[in-house]
Image (cartoon, helix red, strand yellow):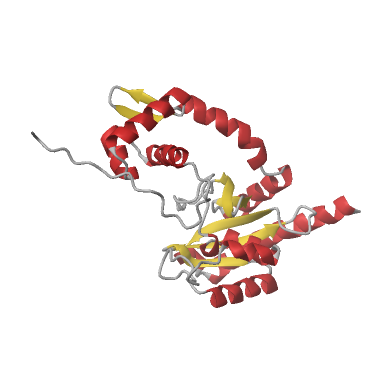
Amino acid sequence: MASTAKTADKPSTDPEAPKDLVQSVARALNIVDVVAASKEPMRAQSIASAVNLHIATTSHLLATLVHAGYLERNERTYKLAAGKILDLSSRVEEDWRPSPLALSLLQMVVEATGESAYLSAWQGRTVTVVAVEEGSHAVRVADLRVGVSGDIHARASGKALLAFGPESQLERVRSVDGELGRRTEHTITTLPEFLADLELTRSRGYALDHQEYVLGVCGMAVPIFEGSQRPRTALSITVPLHRFTNEEYFQRCLDALMEARRLDNEEGNSTQA
């Protein structure tokens, strides 16, 4: 009798998982994430291997997700169900949508610099890109798009929000072993060095990312308060290294961001008057 390779259903080893975690739900959501990340429809066996589950368990979960409308099945392959995802997206869009002021400042910076610009905000315990405006220059960071989050310490937007936000937010970047995640060889990975960088950010009024998120690309960001005591969003631009190191061009980009911050402060003062 031919033997069939089986993948063991291993329990979760996540130390942060709650004690009342419903494992089947966690597994199903993991499958949705795996299928969403794939550029092509996936077969059940490939999904089972990716989530480290037995093929029988995976098949039951896939059938459930198809029935619930989160996945579509076409013969032997699975993909995200566009209707369900678009419906969910429309329901949360209002919470993610930046204010008219923030969007106008975003557009102003793009027109002044030609670089792609981004608005980012706190979503849960992480910083998420909530708006993108394409620049006229060809270079753009593919990793930065609406919905991208994480690596707060390596992104200028994350630094801007942390530097001007409450100290309690720093808990979101602390790690068990004291090391911060390394994105590139330039990423700040020790907490003391990162805290010093945040202090520098506060003193000069803007945050910088020196190839810390993506090699060959640098970021600049300012906090946008909109009349609040804490920043609601961070406005950032990404600049290729060869333009970032050009002093005249760097100043041009910085001037645009600082003008956005000045207008934000002006608008905040008029609102409070």
Quarter of the rendering containing residue 152:
bottom right
Q: Position of residue 165 (x, y in %)?
A: 69, 62
User: Do we see residue 221 in this rendering?
Assistant: yes
Rendered location of residue 115, percent (x, y):
54, 54
Q: How many marks?
A: 0
* Image quadrant assignment for residue 261: bottom right
- Quick one: which residue is furthest to the front in this view? 19
Tell which of 93 and 66 is nearer to you. Answer: 66
Q: In the image shown, does 30 or 19 lie closer to the viewer? A: 19
Q: Is residue 108 left or right of residue 153?
A: right
Across and down, in percent, residue 146 comes to 54, 44
Q: In the picture shown, does residue 182 fall above or below 18?
A: below
Q: Taking 137 as reference, is 39 above or below it?
A: above
Image quadrant containing the N terminus: top left
Question: Which residue is pictured at 29% across the width and 33% down the height?
Answer: 56
Is residue 10 left or right of 244 when viewed as pictured? left
Please, is residue 136 above or below residue 36 in the view?
Answer: below
Residue farthest toward the left in the current orientation of the protein = 1
Residue at 64% in and 49% down: 106
Would you say 231 lies left or right of 11 here?
A: right
Which residue is painted at 33% across and 35% down in the image? 57
Residue toward you, 68 or 93: 68
Residue 43 showing in the rendered view: no
Q: Is residue 159 left or right of residue 202?
A: left
Q: Looking at the image, which residue is at 41% across and 54% down? A: 13
Q: Picture coordinates of residue 125 (x, y %)?
A: 59, 54
The foreground one among 97 and 64 is 64
Res. 49 image quadrant: top left
Residue found farthest to the right: 273
